[in-house]
Amino acid sequence: MSKNDTKNRILDAAEVLFAERGFSDTSLRLITGEAEVNLASVNYHFGSKKELIQAVLDRYLVLFMPRLDERLQALLLRSNLTLIEVFDAFVEPLLSLTEVRYNGPTLFMQLLGRGYMDSQGHLRRFITTHYGGVMGRITKAISKAYPELSAVDLFWRLHFTLGTAVFTMASADALRDIARADFGQQLDVEELIRSVIPYLASGVGAPATPAQLRLAGQ
């Protein structure tokens, strides 16, 4: 087995276990058992569990972020922009993650969700360090589409948006089964993703409540 094969076996096993069990509850011993490699291999290729977690997520980010950034930069050149268009920019980059694994879009969203639920602060630092420019353009595009949104509201609404997106992708198979059984809808993954975009855009673009305005000092 080549060094590259060993590295990919570790990544393949780790990302599935991390998505299913979370980062905190997945031990390196569990990963090496699933990958059928020894612990020294993990240390050789990644150095530590934190670096393995970052490598698992970066296998998707390195594809997703540049493709998303290309679309965001094009949107930011326009004078008029809607939230629907901003969220639509995420669809093709997300679907392209099937290049990593057939269920790459779902795994990627689950891993992002786990990063928040397991309080993996190093992941946020990693993403900010390597993809800070793209993250900035996400908030810039949303602010351009809805300039009335305060920084505080933007933080919370993006947090709620991520939660909705993670739940939708993690439950994709069950949701599609229910839609087929109860409503006769035959949705593929892309159609499911696009069906949630109006909901996300409406949530982010909802008027601020008086309580929110007070909290923002307005």
Image: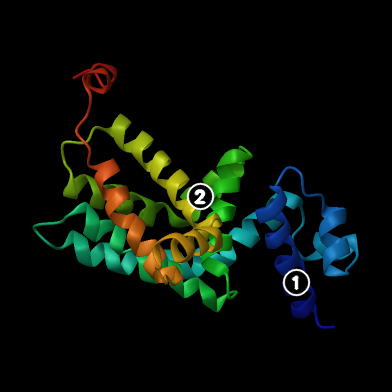
Image position, residue 102 (x, y; %): 58, 75
93 or 55: nearer the viewer: 93
Image position, residue 81 (x, y; %): 15, 56
Residue at the extreme left: 79
Q: Name the residue under label 2.
A: 167
* Left or right relative to 189: residue 197: left
Q: In this view, does 87 lie above or below 146?
A: below
Q: Judge whether residue 67 can be spotted in this image.
A: no
SS at circle 2: helix
5 or 26: nearer the viewer: 26
Q: In which quarter of the image is residue 64?
A: bottom left
Q: Mark 1 points at which residue?
A: 7
Q: Quadrant of residue 19?
A: bottom right
Q: In this view, does 78 lie above or below 151?
A: below
* Left or right relative to 176: residue 89: left
Q: Judge whether residue 216 can be spotted in this image.
A: yes
Number of residues whose C-alpha sits closer than 10 Å to that of mark 1, classed few (under 14), some (14–19) or many (20 or more): some
Residue at image coords 71%, 66%: 11
Mark 1: amino acid: Lys
